Amino acid sequence: MPTKKPEIGNLIEHTCNLNGKFEGKVVQMLGMQFVYETEDGQTRFCLFRETWRKIDEYSKRENDKISTSKKKKKNN
């Protein structure tokens, strides 16, 4: 079974068994892993065989709107 690979510029969600979930943009491809940067500036590595998925930019924007509106409701 071939290993799936993202492309540079893809938004991804990486589930790390030790540290939780992270989202970021792929910035570099290596032999058996890729490098991505999170919104808060972290540079993280993910093996192709680890648990990760590509995020559609449209759905990410919609999820951001939903979480922002939930925060506003909590603050009121």
Image (spheres, helix red, strand yellow):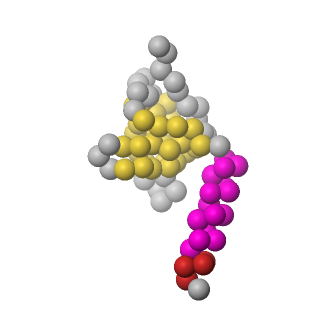
Asked if 67 appears above or below 59 in the picture, the reply is below
Residue 6, given in percent of the width and then of the height, sits at: 55, 31
Does the stretch in magenta take in 50? no
Left-right relation of 66 to 30:
right
The residue positioned 57% from the left and 38% from the top of the image is 54
Comparing 55 with 10, the one in front is: 55
Residue 69, given in percent of the width and then of the height, sits at: 64, 71
Left-right relation of 52 to 68:
left
Residue 31, given in percent of the width and then of the height, sits at: 43, 23
Residue extending farthest left: 18
The residue positioned 43% from the left and 53% from the top of the image is 42
Left-right relation of 22 to 12:
left
Asked if 10 appears above or below 73 in the picture, the reply is above
Q: Which residues are magenta?
A: 57-71
The residue positioned 47% from the left and 13% from the top of the image is 1
Comparing 64 with 34, the one in front is: 64
Image-quadrant location for residue 17:
top left
Does the stretch in magenta take in 58? yes
Image-quadrant location for residue 44:
top left
Residue extending farthest bottom: 76
